[in-house]
Amino acid sequence: MNTTAFSNLPVLEPGNVWLVGAGPGDPGLLTLLAAKGLAEADIVVYDALVNEDCLKLARQDAALEYAGKRGGKPSAKQRDISLRLVELARAGQRVLRLKGGDPFVFGRGGEEALTLVEYNIPFRIVPGITAGIGGLAYAGIPVTHRDINHAVTFLTGHDSSGVVPDAINWEAIGKGSPVIVMYMAMKHIAQISTKLIASGRSPHEPVAFVSNAATDGQKVLETTLGEAAAAVAESRFEPPAIVVVGEVIRLRPSLDWLGALAGRRLQPDPFARKANKVTA
């Protein structure tokens, strides 16, 4: 690896913790600072959603410690994970906490950072590309497009107890947000779809599920709000998946660049302004 790119970047010091976003899957989406931290860390404490190919960038003699949390499966308690980071830092280790996506976007990085503050442990936040943006980009779905939307809402599909969050104003989001990107929502898509349709969304509005985004196992399911629950059940689609609702999904036949690399013929922009077309 060319170390010149790293020469002016911060150093992961003993007794410090870096909370690092690994992005949605593809190790090529790691930042330079994330890659440098992986090369310097004594121990990498990583999440369930981190692609194993990202871990291959860790220092050869670094310890790898799994601390994944997956809904409905035995998982470490968040407080225990946070205190483990304190313990390792106090032992003089260079600690890299590697989290899928971005640590501060539904990644509970804030909770871990606050525990480090509580115990006076120095830390650095290294943002990553969140799956709700990067994962959809790998599916050929932009979260914004000037012909379609000027706003987007990111939300979680379940709260700490595992149910659809009552704290979310579904009516306001349904009426006010042209594009809705949902994390951890697939399990509750029937309830969520009902709430959004009740708020005025059309049952014919496009919905897409992107599973294992930005990895070799990426799959995309396109359906409609009214048919979403049945489509998921029939396809046996499994998490982790990002769910997006909105007209931007209609751009996928034009922007599925991964499909194009595999031989798919991309379609003309369905929202193109005829007056702006360039003639050959």
Image (cartoon, rainbow, N blue to C red):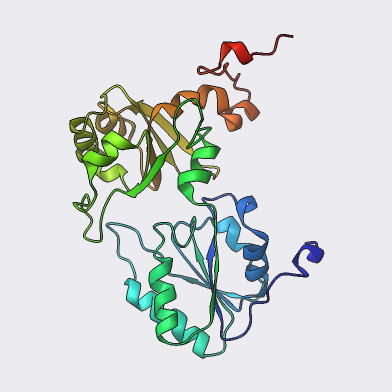
Which residue is located at x 29 percent, y 40 percent?
173
Which residue is located at x 30 percent, y 57 percent?
71
Q: Residue furthest top?
A: 279
Is residue 173 in sight in this rendering? yes
Is residue 183 in sight in this rendering? no
In-image side of 229 versus 36 (left or right): left
Percent across and percent down for residue 202 are 26, 24
Which residue is located at x 63 percent, y 58 percent?
31
Percent across and percent down for residue 118 are 40, 84
* Total tally of numbered discs in the picture: 0
- Tell me the quarter of the picture where residue 189 sits: top left
Percent across and percent down for residue 70 are 34, 59
Q: Is residue 75 above or below residue 174?
A: below
Q: Residue furthest bottom?
A: 91
Q: Please identify the quadrant where the N terminus is shown.
A: bottom right
In-image side of 130 versus 34 (left or right): left
Q: Is residue 216 above or below residue 114?
A: above
Percent across and percent down for residue 67 are 42, 69
- Tell me the quarter of the picture where residue 277 sits: top right
Which residue is located at x 68 percent, y 61 percent?
32
Q: Please identify the quadrant where the C terminus is shown.
A: top right
In-image side of 104 versus 276 (left or right): left
Q: Nearer the viewer, residue 263 or 181?
A: 181
Q: Is residue 15 above or below residue 125?
A: below
